[in-house]
Image: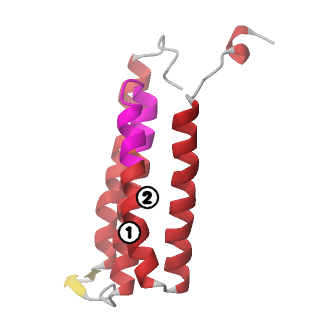
């Protein structure tokens, strides 16, 4: 095993517990969306999104983690907006031309892509020596 293969990335147990809880909330949100359980789906937005921002904040000193966690946060925002647009039956309402309310979820989806594009195409190539640029 070479030195690169022996590198270990440690996550504090408190962070891991929060990440695991985050997954539980996220699954409940998406199950509620699938089953059209509006109150549960809407209620799960708050803990899911809150924990995703806390995770991003806690990892802010590791740019690779921060960028990926911010992308996850905006993904949850996009999913939550899309879910709510379906719950309130406005998803197919026209905003302009052929753009519907549901299409507005593309704004946070694209924001996530832009965050990751910054990391992979700008930050990471300029910081090759940094072991935290995974």
Instruction: Tell me if residue 116 can be seen.
Output: no
Label 2 crowd (10 A; few <14 / some 14-19 / many >=20):
many
The residue where tag 2 is placed is 48
Label 1 crowd (10 A; few <14 / some 14-19 / many >=20):
many
Instruction: Tell me if residue 7 can be seen.
Output: yes
Task: Give 96 or 8, whichever is nearer the viewer.
Answer: 8
**Residues in magenta, as a range:** 52-69
- Residue 132 among magenta residues: no
SS under mark 1: helix
Q: Residue at x 60, y 24 (%)?
A: 10
- Overall secondary structure of the magenta section: helix
The residue where tag 1 is placed is 80
Q: Find the distance from the CA under tag 1 to the CA under tag 2.
A: 10 Å
Colour scheme employed for the rendering of this structure: secondary structure
Residue farthest toward the right in the current orientation of the protein: 1
78 lies above or below 60: below
Residue 35: x and y, percent? 55, 85
SS under mark 2: helix
C-beta proximity under 8 Å, tags 1 and 2: yes
Residue 104: x and y, percent? 28, 71
8 lies above or below 69: above
Residue 122: x and y, percent? 36, 28
Q: Quadrant of the C terminus?
A: top right
Residue 52: x and y, percent? 41, 49
Mark 1 or 2: in front is 2
Determine which quarter of the picture holds residue 100. bottom left
Task: From the viewer's perspective, tell me whether residue 72 is left or right of residue 21.
Answer: left
């Amino acid at each position: 095993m070479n030195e690169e293969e022996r590198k270990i990335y440690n996550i504090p147990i408190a962070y891991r517990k929060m990440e695991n809880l985050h997954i539980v909330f996220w699954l409940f949100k998406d199950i509620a969306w699938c089953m059209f359980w509006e109150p549960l789906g809407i209620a799960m937005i708050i803990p899911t999104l809150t924990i995703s921002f806390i995770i991003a904040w806690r990892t802010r000193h590791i740019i690779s983690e921060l960028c990926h966690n911010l992308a996850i946060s905006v993904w949850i925002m996009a999913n939550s907006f899309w879910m709510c647009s379906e719950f309130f039956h406005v998803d197919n309402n026209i905003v302009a031309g052929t753009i519907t309310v549901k299409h507005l979820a593309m704004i946070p989806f694209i924001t996530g892509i832009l965050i990751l594009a910054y990391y992979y195409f700008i930050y990471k190539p300029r910081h090759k020596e940094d072991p935290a640029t995974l």
